[in-house]
Image (tube, rainbow, N blue to C red):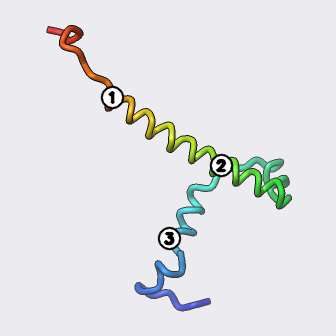
Amino acid sequence: MSFMDRKNILSEGFFDSLKKFFTRPKLSPEEKKMMKNPEFKKLYNDILKNSRDIKAVLDKERQKQKEKRVKSKYYQYK
């Protein structure tokens, strides 16, 4: 194990591994057994990655739609 000081703590990926520890999904005992299969684990990780990509695209499109909306003066409350 390498010595961890202030300079190399980021290069060792300490914070990345710490973040993964807290953000990993909670799995049931059956899911834990299935995750031991490398093919299933790869497919599962691909699905998670794709769902994050889809969410990012949807958020971007929703933001574009919000920016396109023009409030007409006829619909404003007085």
Real-space CA distance between mark 1 and mark 2, rounded to the nearest whole angstrom: 31 Å
Q: Give amino acid for label 1.
A: Lys
- Find disc 3 in the rendering and name its residue: 15
Q: Give amino acid for label 2.
A: Leu
Q: Earlier in the sequence, mark 3 or mark 1?
A: 3
Q: Give amino acid for label 3.
A: Phe
Say the numbered circle drawn on residue 26: none
Q: Residue at position x 57%, y 69% from top?
A: 17
Q: Position of residue 42 (x, y in %)?
A: 76, 57
Q: Earlier in the sequence, mark 3 or mark 2?
A: 3
Q: Position of residue 11 (x, y in %)?
A: 49, 81
Q: Earlier in the sequence, mark 1 or mark 2?
A: 2
Q: Residue at position x 53%, y 68% from top?
A: 16
Comparing labels 3 and 1, the label whose residue is closer to the camera: 1
Say the numbered circle drawn on residue 48: 2
Q: Nearer the viewer, residue 65 or 15?
A: 65
SS at badge 1: helix
The crowding category of the residue bearing disc 1, from other C-alpha atoms within 10 Å (few below 14, some 14 to 19, many at least 20), is few
Q: Position of residue 30 (x, y in %)?
A: 83, 48
Say the numbered circle drawn on residue 68: 1
